[in-house]
Amino acid sequence: MDLPRRTPSAQSSTTRGVDQQPELQSIASEEDDKSSITESIFPFSATDHNPPSLRIEMEPVKQSRRDYQTDNDDSFSSLRRNSSDAVVLTWKDLWVMVSDSKNGRKPILEGLTGYAEPGKMLAIMGPSGCGKSTLLDALAGRLSSNTQQNGEIHLNGHRETLAFGTSAYVTQDDTLMTTLTVREAVYYSAQLQLPDSMSRSEKKERAEMTIREMGLQDSMDTRIGGWSTKGISGGQKRRVSICIEILTRPKLLFLDEPTSGLDSAASYHVMNRIYKLAYQDGRTVVASIHQPSGEVFQLFHSLFLLSSGRTVYFGPVSMAEQFFASNGFPCPKLRNPSDHYLRTINKDFDVDMEQGAIDRSTTEEAINILVQSYKSSKICHDVQERVSMICQQPVTLAALTFPSPISSSGSQRILFYPNSLKLKCTESPRSSAIEP
Ligand SMILES: Nc1ncnc2c1ncn2[C@@H]1O[C@H](COP(=O)(O)OP(=O)(O)OP(=O)(O)O)[C@@H](O)[C@H]1O
């Protein structure tokens, strides 16, 4: 079910009766037993002269706003911005297992819960091998066949398959045609991916604009190259891969290590561009990232910190420092917070460390403290609640105006609950409702 596509335009809704509106008709048919009430909600007649207006609007659940709002952090305004095709991604109790010849099945991800919202960027971080790519693969529906997945992944609160071009995934490996120039690679991709409704020149313009956005204008006519012929650098290849994936301006963008191979200035430039894509146009961005600089880290709204497939922290970036400090791991002054989080939970090199600054058992202990503390924290509780609310919230994403014979004054709201296919109509000051 593709809700955004089902939503009629305001103009067409005012000029058509409900029986000509397939989306409203299908919702109403789910409510046959309440047909008398829905009739009283939707008997819109074109012959009704000067009817008062009836407004259908999205009403996101507001409870957690207080918990997650930071200075530039307004998920609800971002949901409303371009809300007709915004994507909210949630995952609940997500497990991924692989077959292990010795122990049977081995978990790679252990019961992860979280969400990614429009207009925001989520960073997935953790030591090498902690499960960052596996989480991205699971969320993008690209897990390899030898894995087994349990748990729920929802789009806009329900199981949904996104239409072509709505999501994109920039993988860790740059799979590019080595004989093409940057311009050719992006341009041919634009020809293939962009809709027929765009002319060739529009596609070319989009390709060149995207190349410039990724700071590749000086390398436009350089061959990509490979192991036998030197071409553009590794970092530039990364940017070409990102160009190709953002050509369609996807509403949901997965990026696996988008900044690997980039220097700090280029990393900031690329991530800032992606941030703008997310923030200005209400896109949802999920990126795994290694060692971001302080500036790059600040671009992210939320952080998912993993250790061996377990959640060390999921929540607003702004609250992570306090979480670490309250568990006995304050970030030293002048240290980049993201470095601090990774250093606290990275046990890979403990055995090689000299002078016992940290030993393996201490790091393991630190991880266990943080994992247990997170599980019982208010942040975790709020995240669980938020995910549940997103999966139940009404998602009538466009504001529509209907002539209404039952409202003589004030406005009415009709809320559509996707999981229950029920309608709720409220009117001010009177109220007539089908409760969800
Ligand atoms: N299909 C698979 N079969 C067997 N093991 C797998 C599979 N996918 C992932 N793993 C294992 O799961 C663990 C997590 O891998 P993953 O690639 O998700 O880590 P990562 O955090 O992205 O690592 P890096 O930062 O080094 O890219 C690793 O130990 C990896 O070997």
Image: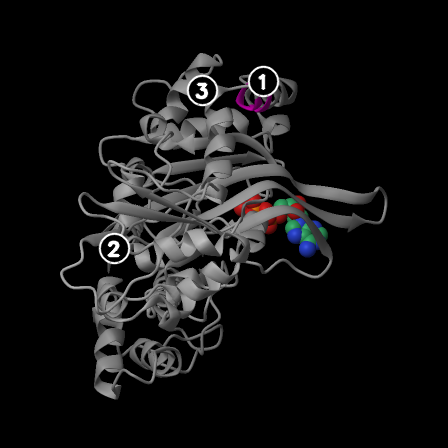
Q: Quadrant of residue 431?
A: top left
Q: Does the beta carbon at disc 2 come under 8 Å from ligand 1? A: no
Q: Which mark is residue 405?
A: 2
Note whether 110 is above or below 10 in the view shown.
above
Q: In this image, 138 relative to 22: left or right?
A: right
Whether pointer 2 and pointer 3 mark residues with C-beta atoms closer than 8 Å, the reply is no
Q: Nearer the viewer, residue 387 or 399?
A: 399
Q: Give the side of residue 78 with respect to residue 149, left or right.
A: left
Q: Position of residue 266 (x, y in %)?
A: 28, 53
Q: Say whether residue 166 is visible.
A: no
Asked whether mark 1 lies closer than 8 Å to ligand 1, one says no
Relative height, residue 376 to residue 291 (above, below):
above
Q: Which is nearer the eye, 208 or 246?
A: 246
Per the rendered image, the range of residues in magenta is: 371-375
Separation of marks 2 and 3 at Cα, in angstroms: 57 Å
Residue 324 is labelled as: 3
Residue sitting at x 38%, y 30%: 64
**Amino acid at circle 3:** Phe
| Element assignment for label 1 | helix
Q: Earlier in the sequence, mark 1 or mark 2?
A: 1
- Callout in the foreground (2, 3): 2
How many numbered circles does the render carry? 3
Considering the whole magenta stretch, tell me its main secondary structure. helix
What's under tag 1, amino acid-wise? Ile
Return the x and y of residue 306 as percentages of the image width and height: 54, 35
- Residue 369: mark in rendering: 1
Q: Residues within 10 Å of mark 1 (few under 14, many from 20)?
A: some
Name which residue lies at 61% across and 17% down: 362
